[in-house]
Amino acid sequence: MHSITIITNLLHFLADIVYMTNCWMCIVLLYFSLYIAILLDNLFMLYFTFQCYYNTSCYGMWNNQL
């Protein structure tokens, strides 16, 4: 249980960094957190990454391409 908290905090920290950088890092983080969420059977961890994805230029970029 303690390790899940550490990983969740790490993902939150990474999401904050990615929020300040770019879209592609956010996509990498999304896949990474998805893998960890499945591994730990804890889908709540995806919340930070999806929040990151929708807050960055990613969301607008993909919408403009459609």
Image: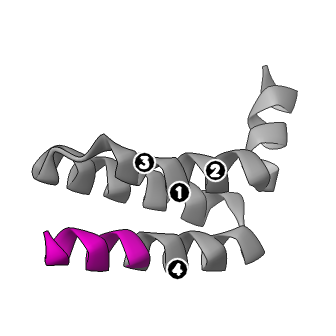
Magenta residue span: 1-9
Q: Which mark is residue 51?
A: 2
Q: Name the amino acid type tagged 3.
A: Leu
Residue for badge 3: 46
Of the two numbered discs 4 and 2 on the same chain, state the one appearing first in sequence: 4
Q: Which mark is residue 39?
A: none
What whole-number distance in Å separates the C-alpha atoms at marks 2 and 1? 5 Å
Q: Quadrant of the C terminus?
A: top right
- SS of the residue at dot 3? helix
What whole-number distance in Å separates the C-alpha atoms at marks 4 and 2? 13 Å
- SS of the residue at dot 1? helix
What whole-number distance in Å separates the C-alpha atoms at marks 3 and 1? 6 Å
Q: Which mark is residue 48?
A: 1
Q: Up-down: is 61 above or below 51?
A: above
For the point 13% across and 68% down, the residue is: 1
Q: Position of residue 21 (x, y in %)?
A: 72, 75
Q: Position of residue 48 (x, y in %)?
A: 53, 57
- SS of the residue at dot 4? helix
For the point 57% across and 66% down, the residue is: 25
Q: Which mark is residue 13?
A: 4
Local crowd size for mark 2, using a 10 Å CA cut-off: few (<14), some (14–19), many (≥20): some
Q: Quadrant of residue 6?
A: bottom left
Tag 3–tag 1 contact (CB < 8 Å): yes
Q: Name the amino acid type tagged 2.
A: Gln
Q: Up-down: is 39 above or below 61?
A: below
